[in-house]
Image (tube, rainbow, N blue to C red):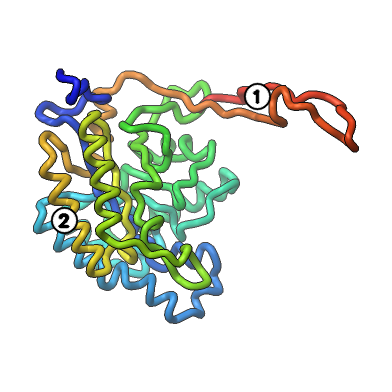
């Protein structure tokens, strides 16, 4: 290998140097309603979200067909129930459907029992609507809980794509002392269209809506860097955001550019996960720490030093 082409950080199938996946979170109305059910009374806001399944998904499917690219669509169960024909059109076009909660629930800090109910309701909806039994999961808001991996393993999932701690896929233990593991395909906020485009008054966004040219440049720079190091580039788009005309056009240009990178394997997350499960021998753990206070920093009370902070304590690995 030359200095310009270091050894890849991951072993890909023969003939491939790196991997790329175009993924779409088909949130539609669910992500708004999970945040505030009263938003159902806001007709214009609901129409903003329904642009995704009604207008954008058919447009994106046409782009993917022109480019001969298979993608991964993460669909909340509620979205599947509201737009069953849309979900079936994704399946009929040969793309992967992944699990994305039921109502794009607020996941942070919820109980194991509640999360299990959300998972099961989403699974039931996808199967009833389109006969889909997903092997992949993406947590709403990418917010995994420490008990989530074991719940996924219990339900037969192959992989998750919610964590942010890698440039390539890996296997990880689902719980301390567990022999079960999942494949993780990491994501990155720099590769999410929400940060570039999302805005609706009174709901989300800073009000700064970026140019599609800027977003395309940012994402292509990341793809080129991952290609150089042999990693896994995962783009996350939302149809109601990136399906707007100029953004969809820029996305198709990006697809063409990523496909043109020599040895880039453009495929679904399921394909990446199956390759990882079959070839990766190392199983990682995730450390969980309790940090009651900053180490070595004096604790003050009423201006007097009353003690020192304790060191971090490892609670468990998962």
Q: Residue 58 appears at what percent x and percent y?
A: 20, 67
Query: Can residue 127 be seen in the rendering of this structure?
Result: no
Q: Residue 202 appears at what percent x and percent y?
A: 52, 71
Q: In the image, is 197 to the left or to the right of 259? A: right
Residue at horizontal 18 percent and vertical 61 percent from the top: 61
Tell me the crowding category of disc 2: few under 14, some 14 to 19, or many 20 or more residues within 10 angstroms, Cα based: some
Q: In the image, is 34 to the left or to the right of 284? A: right
Q: Residue 8 appears at what percent x and percent y?
A: 22, 24
Q: In the rendered image of this protein, does residue 153 appear above or below residue 96?
A: above
The one of 57 and 4 positioned closer to us in this rendering: 4
Q: Which quarter of the figure is the N terminus placed in?
A: top left
Residue that badge 2 annotates: 253
Instruction: State how far apart marks 2 and 1 are (Cα).
Output: 47 Å
Residue at horizontal 18 percent and vertical 25 percent from the top: 4
Q: In the image, is 197 to the left or to the right of 316? A: left
Quadrant in which residue 78 is drawn: bottom left
Q: Residue 278 appears at what percent x and percent y?
A: 24, 26
**Which element is circle 1 on?**
loop
Residue that badge 1 annotates: 312
């Amino acid at each position: 290998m030359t200095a310009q082409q270091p050894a890849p950080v991951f072993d890909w199938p023969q003939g491939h140097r790196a991997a790329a996946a175009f993924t779409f979170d088909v949130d539609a109305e669910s992500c708004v309603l999970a945040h505030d059910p009263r938003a159902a009374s806001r007709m214009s806001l609901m129409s903003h979200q329904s642009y995704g399944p009604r207008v954008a998904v058919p447009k994106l499917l046409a782009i993917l067909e022109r480019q001969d690219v298979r993608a991964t669509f993460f669909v909340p169960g509620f979205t599947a129930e509201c737009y069953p024909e849309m979900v079936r059109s994704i399946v009929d076009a040969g793309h992967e459907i992944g699990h994305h909660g039921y109502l794009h629930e607020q996941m942070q800090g919820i109980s194991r029992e509640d999360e299990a109910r959300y998972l099961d309701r989403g699974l039931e909806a996808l199967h009833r609507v389109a006969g889909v039994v997903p092997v992949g999961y993406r947590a709403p808001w990418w917010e995994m809980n420490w008990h989530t991996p074991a719940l996924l393993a219990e339900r037969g999932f192959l992989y998750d794509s919610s964590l942010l701690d890698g440039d390539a896929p890996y296997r990880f233990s689902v719980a301390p002392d567990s022999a079960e593991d999942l494949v993780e395909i990491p994501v990155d906020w720099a590769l999410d269209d929400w940060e570039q485009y999302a805005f609706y008054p009174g709901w989300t966004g800073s009000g700064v809506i970026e140019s599609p040219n800027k977003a395309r440049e940012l994402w292509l720079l990341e793809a080129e860097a991952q290609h150089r190091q042999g990693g896994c580039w995962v783009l996350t788009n939302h149809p109601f955001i990136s399906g707007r005309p100029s953004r969809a056009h820029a996305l198709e240009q990006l697809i063409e550019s990523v496909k043109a990178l020599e040895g880039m394997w453009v495929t679904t997350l399921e394909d990446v996960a199956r390759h990882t499960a079959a070839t990766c021998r190392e199983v990682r753990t995730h450390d969980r720490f309790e940090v009651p206070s900053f180490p070595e920093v004096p604790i003050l009370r009423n201006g007097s030093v009353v003690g020192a902070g304790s060191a971090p304590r490892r609670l468990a690995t998962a």
